[in-house]
């Protein structure tokens, strides 16, 4: 379905519209975004649409999830194109608050949400405080929108796991769905940050997807996971990447157990975060080590 999308930036307007839908017994789907939308985001909207009567998408570049020296200031902001794209994707309402509408007491006084454990590794270790910022804003967005179902991309694998943990622990009455990664023809995962890449970097970037496939193939072929990880990291370094991590993990991001460990269903995820110049890219591949 395509049509007009209403864009609101005041919380009372958002609440009025959603209250009306709820009074009519409608199921509300929600897609949180930081804008600069592309096909990856629109696939989330379509998934939400398939699970809800009305779809709300938020467009908000969240300052609390960027560390010092990261790309908060230069993060691409394209609100008009986002609203047009959301309409075409079947979204009904765009929630586009300013920073002071999201953080009315100011950033210093904002109540923070911290998920322990799973946020201490991988992106949590490389971007200290990042997931506190993500959970802090997503908890607010959930309270503002009060969706029945919320959709997150599987490209941000650790983020999805952290959100599931938060939803379960804080008893948000929300079903969380993960949407498949959308890739370019050459395998590069769609991301707003891809546009930072120079022509030369863009040509190199699909090596991340190849590294993920190589780790999967190595493990499925019987190679040890540590060897597969170090081969992937070496390959990416040789191609000019600065590698934050290239790892194999269980679905809850633990190191894989030894062969035949009780309770191990063989599900694995290969994850990479690597920089090309100033651009940090992440990607992952879920697979079964038994096949
Ligand atoms: O995945 C993102 O774009 C952001 O981390 C999110 C979930 C919209 C929170 O700001």
Image: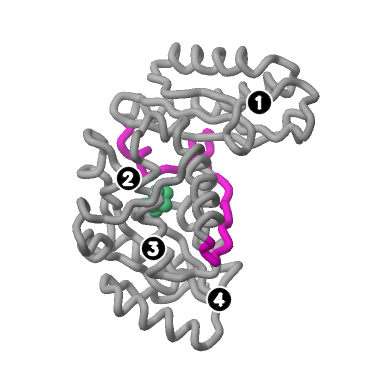
Say which residue label 4 marks.
Answer: 27
Instruction: Tell me what residue is drawn at x 50 percent, y 37 percent.
Output: 117
- Say which quadrant the C terminus sits in: top right
Crowdedness of circle 3 by 10 Å Cα count: few (<14), some, many (20+)? Answer: some
Say which residue label 2 marks.
Answer: 65
Left or right relative to 30: residue 275: left
- Whole-number angstrom distance, CA of label 2 to CA of label 1: 29 Å
Left or right relative to 113: residue 272: right
Say which residue label 3 marks.
Answer: 141
> Which region shows up in magenta?
171-197
- Judging from the image, what secondary structure is the residue with disc 2 in? helix
Crowdedness of circle 1 by 10 Å Cα count: few (<14), some, many (20+)? Answer: some
Magenta segment main secondary structure: loop
Q: Is mark 2 within 8 Å of ligand 1?
A: yes
Comparing labels 2 and 4, the label whose residue is closer to the camera: 2
Say which residue label 1 marks.
Answer: 256
Nearest to N terminus: mark 1 or mark 3 = 3
Q: List x then y, in percent, for residue 194.
A: 37, 38
Nearest to N terminus: mark 2 or mark 4 = 4
- Judging from the image, what secondary structure is the residue with disc 4 in? loop
Q: Is mark 3 within 8 Å of ligand 1?
A: yes
Left or right relative to 105: residue 155: right
């Amino acid at each position: 379905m395509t049509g007009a999308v209403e864009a609101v930036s005041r919380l009372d307007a958002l609440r009025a519209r959603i209250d009306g839908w709820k009074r009519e017994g409608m199921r509300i789907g929600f897609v949180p975004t930081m804008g600069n939308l592309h096909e990856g985001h629109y696939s989330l909207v379509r998934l939400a649409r398939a699970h809800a009567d009305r779809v709300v998408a938020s467009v908000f570049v969240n300052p609390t999830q960027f560390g010092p020296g990261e790309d908060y200031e230069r993060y691409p902001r394209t609100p008009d194109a986002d609203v047009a794209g959301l309409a075409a994707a079947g979204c009904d309402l765009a929630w586009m608050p300013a920073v002071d509408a999201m953080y009315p007491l100011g950033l210093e006084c904002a109540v923070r949400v911290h998920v322990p454990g799973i946020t201490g590794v991988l992106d949590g270790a490389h971007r200290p405080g990042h997931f506190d910022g993500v959970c802090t804003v997503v908890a607010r967005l959930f309270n503002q929108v009060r969706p029945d179902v919320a959709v997150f991309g599987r490209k941000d694998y650790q983020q999805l796991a952290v959100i599931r943990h938060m939803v379960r622990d804080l008893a948000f009455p929300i079903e969380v769905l993960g949407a498949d990664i959308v890739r370019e023809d050459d395998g590069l995962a769609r991301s707003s940050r891809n546009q930072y890449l120079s022509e030369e970097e863009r040509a190199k970037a699909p090596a991340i997807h190849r590294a993920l496939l190589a780790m999967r193939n190595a493990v499925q072929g019987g190679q040890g996971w540590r060897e597969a990880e170090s081969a992937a990291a070496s390959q990416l370094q040789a191609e000019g990447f600065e590698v934050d991590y290239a790892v194999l993990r269980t679905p809850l991001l633990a190191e894989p157990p030894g062969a035949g460990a009780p309770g191990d269903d063989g599900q694995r995820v290969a994850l990479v975060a690597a920089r090309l110049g100033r651009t940090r890219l992440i990607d992952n591949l879920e697979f079964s080590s038994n096949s």
